[in-house]
Amino acid sequence: MNHFDPELYWNSRITGAIDLAEVGQNSLGAYNKIAYRFRLKAIKDALSYISLDFPNIRLFEAGFGTGFYLSLWDSMEVDNVIGVDISFNAVSLISKVFPQYYIFQHDIAKTLPTDFKKVDLALAIDVLYHIIDDTKWEKSIENLAKLVRPGGFLIFTDKFPSDGVYQKEAHVRRRSLELYRNILIQQGFRIERIQPVFILMDNPIVFGSPKWLGMVSLLQWKLLMLPFRVFKNWTKVRDIFAIIIAYIQYPVEQLALAVFDRSPNLEMVIAKKEG
């Protein structure tokens, strides 16, 4: 696990096409296209919560990948957008698709250019848990926090174990909400809102809260993912099953998100900078 190379990994994932199969869980193919509707809903809910003058804001997005959220900023007519990604392939692709935005390659664990103006909103959606080195993870949060003006916001996602850290895969390391909170407090932030992104349509952690919901979610996930393992080498058949499974889960996921205010699955955090 210690030999994980994030730049090499993400260059291998972004291969030259804007495709949701390149992100999320790429083994699930077309499933991502349905599941990402809940990601979009989550960020729209978060934006409706924060008090910013859209589209007249300065926005920074870390780890834009295939530009899923950049498309949202474009549709909202947000003109002042800075985007960074560790992947050269992602930067090469996205800078052509969104030439109106300032796009460049950068590792957010490293200091950002000092001439940047403060931003109203910084985002690290599905980014921070891919930084497996704890020192770099902490530095990344600090770098993002320093970009945000007083009264501005930082939005990020993770699956939060009840305490400590949890790592099962080389490229994913989960940290507790308390670990995040401690760093954010040091940087002058307070967590204002935590909202579930998924309860069923992603692989949960059973060490989250509530634990029983994590166990139920994990069981249904394992059962529904069986066709993906069976047909992993037949992508067309896999994608047929992917759409069927996603549409079975979709209304149940909608109901679950309406009932539960916390999830052992992916959650989105809104933090505000004091001042």
Image (spheres, rainbow, N blue to C red):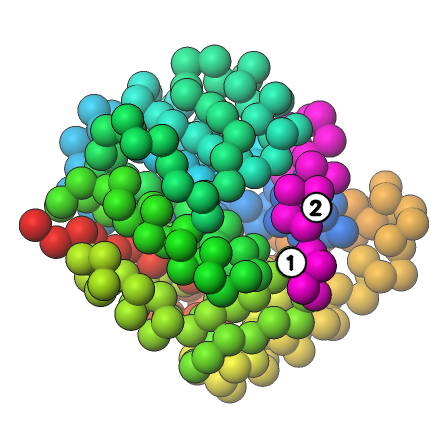
Q: Are marks 1 and 2 in contact (CB under 8 Å)?
A: yes
Q: Residue at x 78, y 45 (%)?
A: 239
Instruction: Name the residue at 64% across, 42% down.
Output: 7
Instruction: State the image quarter where residue 29 is shown.
Output: top right
Q: CA distance from mark 1 to mark 2?
A: 8 Å
Q: Which residue lies at the image location 86% right of the left edge and 41% below the top edge?
A: 236
Q: Nearer the viewer, residue 249 or 132?
A: 132
Q: 5 or 235, which is in the foreground? A: 5
Quickly name the residue at label 1: 171
Q: Is residue 215 magenta?
A: no
Tag count = 2
Tell me the amino acid under the disc marked 1: His
Helix, strand or loop at mark 2: helix
Ranked by sequence position, the earlier of labels 1 and 2 is 2
Q: Counting other residues with Cα less than 10 Å from the Cα at mark 2, is it few (<14), some (14-19), or many (20 or more)?
A: few
Q: Is residue 16 above or below residue 169?
A: above
Residue at position x 30%, y 22% from top? 80
On the rendered structure, is 73 left or right of 135?
Answer: left
What are the residue bounds of the magenta stretch? 1-21
Q: Residues within 10 Å of mark 1 (few under 14, many from 20)?
A: some
